Amino acid sequence: MSGTWITTRAWLLMLPLLVVMIAVIGWPLVDTVRLSFTDARLVGTEGTFVGFDNYAKMLGGSNFLRAFVTTTWFAVVSVTAEMVIGVLAALLLNQQFRGRTALRALMILPWALPTVVNATLWRLIYNPEYGALNAALTQIGLIDSYRSWLGEPGSALTALIIADCWKNFPLVALIALAALQAVPRDITAASLVDGAGPFNRFRYVIMPYLAGPLLVALVLRTIEAFKVFDLIWVMTRGGPANSTRTLSILVYQEAFSFQRAGSGASLALIVTLLVTVLAVAYAGLVRKAAGAS
Amino acid sequence: MERQNPVFTAFVYASALLLAAIILAPILWLFVMSISSAADLSTKPLNWWPSEIDLSRYRLLLSTIENSAGAAFTASLFNSLKVAGMATLAAIAVAIPAAWAVSRTPSISWSLYGVIATYMLPPVALAVPLYMGLAYLGLLNSVFGLALVYLTILAPFTTWLLKSGFDSIPKEIESAAMIDGARLDQILRLITLPLAAPVMATSALFAFLLAWDEFFYALLFTSDLRAKTLTVAISDLAGGRVSDYGLIATAGVLAALPPVLIGLVMQRALISGLTSGGVKG
């Protein structure tokens, strides 16, 4: 068979997917760009062309900067914690001990729990009146009066980060564990004979096997964390005093609560651009890491 | 092998217990709340174990008596099943030929990167036109419209997973059949797809779990019993005026049950899907 026919056939087979993706992704994306230059309302007015007004207004306002800082803080702290705890858990699960298989099986539970259920569960745990956290901390004597963890700007974001970590560190752990199990046993054995300490063994023998998969996990988790919406919406709706208002929440409010489709669209595209820059930078990192190992 | 130092062994067991406690405590507490009486949940100090087991909330939420809290809950449960089911079937249907084509045709494999790139898009970047489009088509607040929108997430994702699955099936089997004179549809139907059945099943499960989990679009595009999904129903409960925390917990347990059971039963397949997707990128 000729090469052109094979290529044509391949495109024909791709056609249903392409049609679907143009309909639900391509067209909406292009239309978001169009809307971002108009003052359209969500319902009613079509909107007129306003140039870069929306962008200037959104980037110039204090809301955007604050949401950007909140989002970055959320993403950096939770993803770092997830990576560290995840790798530690994987190193543990890679040891021989009784109950190891059962513990591995348990790790999938937080991952399988729907995000909204996770958010609801932690909201109940943090409840100022009857929440388990207040009860537990008072009963062991760490605090003497109940606190409103999600109701105080000082603690709300940290409380959200803990909830996010709990759900997502197992995913990092499972990816890291799979990579650890690919480390050939004779190499670790040889490094032991050569007298390498645990730290050096981790750094020079195990890390090269972990680096690639961990970078991919890092990319996936960072992009997800940067887009975070459901966890925050269910737990705090961006409050108190906007202390947990991330970029996705801000776009939602602009476009849907205030029905300002045009400026909401421009904000959404700014967020998209940020995620893209992040992803491209990471892709470069991954390629470099793959080339190095 | 590792030297079996008793101090090290004790450290391993202590860490394992700690990890198990971290994982299990919140989940067990959700379950305990769901079977505790309202009185047990609102005493200080808190009763960590119910004085008597109260299953009434499960009966309440699973009842289908008209206009009850149960009717709203079961309606959202069925909506979630319908939306996730329809979206999964449609995603798999378009992903199979595309993933096979990408896997077997190096000259178009670049197009897969375009497909994967859509994963980076924040849903808010598509939400406004999708909202207006669904409104125009009269598909707001319909399970069909929501399933259509879910394809933004499921179609690229399943294509990506299926492609790495097809990659692991040797091309040579297909070439041999082609030399024997089989047509493409026969090769796919009789050779490739049966061999890819496990991968297709895993991809379908992943897609179903993603759709079951989805909240953002469901929040935007549904408003009442006709299409509201489970995730939206639960967030309504959690953010509403319900003061029976046990009832919220029960809804959570019921919504978590299908994915958690799938997770436990299909553990091996899901982990290998996750990691092969993750490692190969």
Image (tube, coloured by chain):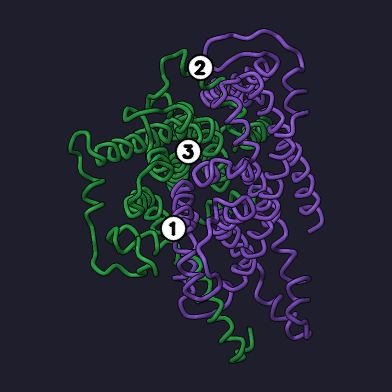
Chain colours: A purple, B green
**Which residue type carries mark 2?**
Gly
Q: Secondary structure at mark 1?
A: loop
The crowding category of the residue bearing disc 2, from other C-alpha atoms within 10 Å (few below 14, some 14 to 19, many at least 20), is: some
**Residue nearest the observer in this picture, B21 or B42:** B42
Up-down: is B189 above or below B17? above
Relative image position of residue B90 (x, y in whole percent): 43, 30
Give a yes or no on whether discs 1 and 2 share a subunit.
Answer: no
Q: Residue furthest left?
A: B65
Going 47% across and 52% down the picture, which residue do you hit?
A: A123
Type of the residue with mark 1 = Glu
Q: Which residue is mark 2?
A: B133
Disc 1 from disc 3: Cα separation: 27 Å
**Quadrant in the picture for residue A184:** bottom right
| Residue type at numbered disc 3 | Phe
Q: How far apart, in angstroms, are the residues tagged by discs 1 and 2? A: 44 Å
Viewer-nearest residue: B252 or B154: B252
Q: On what subunit does the disc labeled 2 rest?
A: B
Q: Which residue is disc 3 drawn over?
A: B215
Please state if A188 lies on the left or on the right of B255 as rendered: right
The residue beneath circle 1 is A129
Q: Residue furthest bottom?
A: B6
Closer to the eye: label 1 or 3: 1
